[in-house]
Image (cartoon, helix red, strand yellow):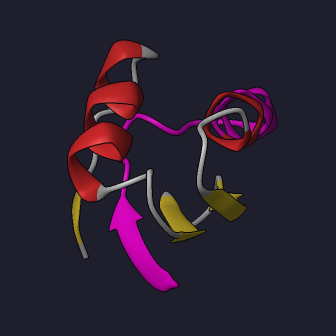
């Protein structure tokens, strides 16, 4: 299992946080998602079949592109 923290600069409110947690939570292999509006950070714990490429692609698709911390 892997835990990574990313910065998602487009997070601006709790609606963004809920959308990220809901969408990522549906991705196979995601164990937990913690997004924070005040720090704009998203911490994700995952295992296969989820991977960084899939997570990054989904975040971009839903409007919250990420970068490494």
Q: Is residue 25 left or right of residue 69?
A: right
Q: Is residue 35 left or right of residue 47?
A: right
Residue 68 pos. (x, y %): 20, 68
Residue 39 pos. (x, y %): 53, 68
- For residue 56: magenta? no
How many numbered discs, if any? 0
Is 13 rendered above or below residue 44? above
Residue drawn at (46%, 16%), measured in percent from left and top?
Answer: 62
Is 50 rendered above or below residue 16? below
Is 56 rendered above or below residue 67? above
Q: Compare residues 68 and 10 and report the one nearer the observer.
A: 68
Q: Is residue 62 left or right of residue 35?
A: left
Residue drawn at (71%, 32%), measured in percent from left and top?
Answer: 26
Dividing the picture into quadrants, the one containing residue 69 is bottom left
What's drawn in magenta, residue-wise? 1-20
Residue drawn at (37%, 44%), measured in percent from left and top?
Answer: 55
Residue lying at the far front in this picture: please name it: 49
Q: Compare residues 10 and 52 and report the one nearer the observer.
A: 52
- For residue 12: magenta? yes
Dividing the picture into quadrants, the one containing residue 9 is top left
Dividing the picture into quadrants, the one containing residue 6 is bottom left
Q: Compare residues 55 and 12 and report the one nearer the observer.
A: 55
Residue 60 pos. (x, y %): 30, 25
Residue drawn at (35%, 15%), measured in percent from left and top?
Answer: 61
């Amino acid at each position: 299992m892997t835990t990574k923290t990313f910065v998602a600069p487009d997070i601006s409110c709790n609606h963004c946080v809920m959308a990220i947690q809901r969408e990522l939570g549906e991705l196979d292999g995601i164990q937990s998602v913690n997004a924070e509006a005040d720090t704009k950070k998203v911490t994700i714990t995952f295992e296969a079949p989820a991977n960084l490429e899939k997570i990054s692609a989904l975040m971009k698709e839903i409007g919250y592109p990420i970068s490494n911390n």
